[in-house]
């Protein structure tokens, strides 16, 4: 009979806990309060995308540095309006900067 390794038990417990959290989150997002929260987040994301694209379109020569300046300006706006939690800002910046290659490719195809 094979011996059970303690890490296997922790991994299984982590997987079960993760699945339970996923189910709980899905349940919450289907409640009226959860749907409102999800709707608000989607609305903010669309608004942020519009503002980002508007700034990019104003730019004659889009470099990675210029794109980062635009992202910083956008995040400063949202920090000032408090529409987005300050704790989320670094994650949002990282996400937007990770999209640089895609933005660059699209920008070049349009210009």
Image (tube, helix red, strand yellow):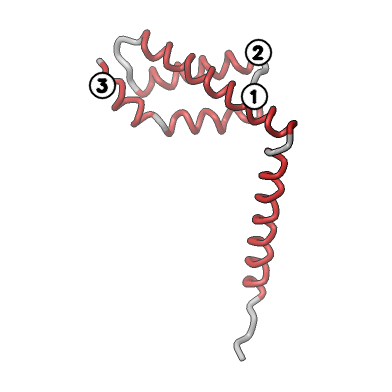
What residue did someone put label 2 on?
81
Name the spot of residue 106 as percent of width and height, x first.
Answer: 30, 24
Tag 3 residue = 108
Q: Earlier in the sequence, mark 2 or mark 3?
A: 2
Residue at x-position 40% and y-position 20%? 67
The percent position of residue 71, horizontal first and vertical second, equals 48, 20
Q: How crowded is mark 3: few (under 14 residues within 10 Å), some or many (20 or more)?
A: few
Look at the numbered disc 1 and give the secondary structure of its residue. Answer: helix
Are the residues at dot 1 and dot 3 in contact (C-beta closer than 8 Å)?
A: no
Give me the residue at 55% from left, 19% from top.
Answer: 75
Q: In which quarter of the image is residue 8?
A: bottom right
The residue depicted at 64 percent of the width and 67 percent of the height is 12
Q: Is residue 101 above or below residue 19?
A: above
Compared across the picture, whether 70 is left or right of 81 comes to left
Mark 1 is surrounded, within 10 Å at the Cα level, by few (under 14), some (14 to 19) or many (20 or more) other residues, namely: few
Image disc number at residue 40: 1
């Amino acid at each position: 009979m094979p011996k059970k390794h303690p890490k296997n038990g922790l991994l299984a417990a982590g997987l079960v806990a993760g699945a339970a959290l996923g189910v709980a989150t899905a349940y919450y997002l289907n409640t009226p309060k959860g749907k409102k929260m999800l709707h608000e987040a989607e609305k903010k994301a669309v608004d942020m995308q519009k503002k980002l694209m508007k700034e990019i379109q104003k730019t004659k020569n889009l470099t990675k540095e210029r794109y980062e300046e635009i992202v910083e300006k956008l995040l400063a706006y949202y920090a000032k309006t408090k529409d987005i939690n300050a704790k989320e800002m670094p994650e949002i910046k990282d996400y937007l900067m990770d999209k640089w290659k895609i933005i660059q490719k699209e920008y070049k195809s349009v210009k």
